Image: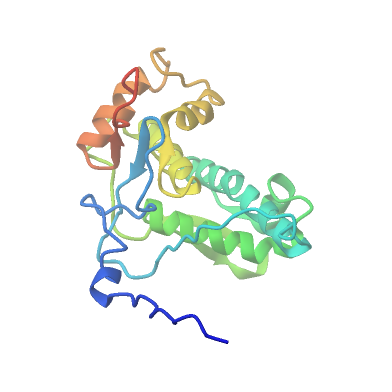
């Protein structure tokens, strides 16, 4: 009886491993591969700020990997993030306080036991994307207010008369991009904005013509990056 010769297994070259991950030249926080139609991504507010890192793992679906109860709860928590971000920024624009009771009644009904986790994620979102802190100002009444954390202003994007409303539009767009993983298709942006009556090519009584503002003005001011999909037909 003879044995088949054993072939040596190829060894991974450490130098090859160093080329697996690449950092995009623009320095965005999004995944290294993101090329959906008309992709938009947000430009980091501070490249040197070290409070946040993002990793995503690829996986495959299988019948054995059905969502468990904890996973479903996680979906529900993340599903409330966008609503709570919008709610808090509405309060921010109105320059009024909000309370935990008001948040639970308006946004997080049924998820009272997960309020701390939802609020923590929203606070991180507000800080990292918008440079705004959510602060508790009256612990006994559990009241909160949003304040600028990094001394940022939006003075460069519009004139004095339009700064406030157009800043709110910027906040909504950045929030959508953040919740989409720091890279969002243009179709998704307009789908969300249509919910407040803002549509590409249509003059809005507050925002004016929004497409130029979003795809050109905000890109020029480096709040957003706007990329055309390579080899798309027709060009997109």
The answer to whether residue 132 shows anywhere in this view is no
Which residue is located at x 35 percent, y 53 percent? 32
In this rendering, the answer to whether 13 lies above or below 143 is below
Query: Residue 117's quadrant in the figure?
Result: bottom right
Residue 132 is situated, as x and y percent measured from the top left of the image, at 41, 55
Could you say which is closer to the camera, residue 33 or residue 116? 33
Could you say which is closer to the camera, residue 109 or residue 10? 10
The N terminus - image quarter: bottom right
Give the residue furthest to the bottom: 1
Query: Residue 163's quadrant in the figure?
Result: top left
Query: Residue 120's quadrant in the figure?
Result: bottom right
The C terminus - image quarter: top left
Instruction: Judge from the rendering whether residue 165 lies leftward or rightward of residue 21; answer left or right.
Output: right
Instruction: Judge from the rendering whether residue 133 lies leftward or rightward of residue 155; answer left or right.
Output: right
Could you say which is closer to the camera, residue 132 or residue 35? 35
Which residue is located at x 37 percent, y 35 percent? 39
In this rendering, the answer to whether 226 lies above or below 196 is below
Which residue is located at x 43 percent, y 39 percent? 184
Residue 70 is situated, as x and y percent measured from the top left of the image, at 73, 64
Which residue is located at x 30 percent, y 52 percent? 28
Instruction: Judge from the rendering whether residue 135 lies leftward or rightward of residue 25; answer left or right.
Output: right
């Amino acid at each position: 009886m003879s044995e088949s010769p054993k072939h040596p297994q190829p060894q991974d070259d450490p130098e090859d491993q160093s080329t697996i991950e690449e950092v995009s030249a623009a320095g965005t926080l999004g995944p290294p591969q993101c090329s959906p139609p008309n992709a938009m991504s947000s430009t980091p507010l501070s490249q040197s700020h070290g409070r946040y890192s993002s990793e995503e793992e690829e996986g495959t679906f299988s019948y054995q990997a059905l969502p468990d109860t904890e996973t479903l709860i996680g979906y529900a928590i993340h599903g409330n993030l966008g609503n709570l971000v919008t709610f808090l920024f509405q309060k921010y624009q109105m320059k009024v306080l909000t309370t935990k009771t008001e948040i639970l009644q308006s946004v997080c009904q049924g998820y009272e036991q997960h309020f701390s986790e939802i609020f923590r994620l929203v606070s991180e979102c507000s800080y990292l994307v918008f440079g705004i802190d959510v602060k508790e100002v009256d612990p006994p009444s559990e009241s909160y207010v949003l304040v600028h954390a990094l001394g940022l202003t939006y003075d460069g994007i519009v004139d004095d008369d339009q700064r406030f409303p157009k800043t709110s539009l910027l906040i909504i767009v950045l929030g959508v991009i953040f919740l989409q993983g720091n890279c969002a298709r243009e179709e998704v942006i307009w789908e969300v904005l249509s919910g407040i009556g803002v549509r590409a090519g249509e003059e809005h009584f507050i925002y004016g013509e929004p497409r130029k503002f979003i795809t050109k003005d905000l890109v020029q001011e480096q709040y957003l990056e706007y990329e055309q999909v390579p080899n798309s037909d027709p060009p997109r």
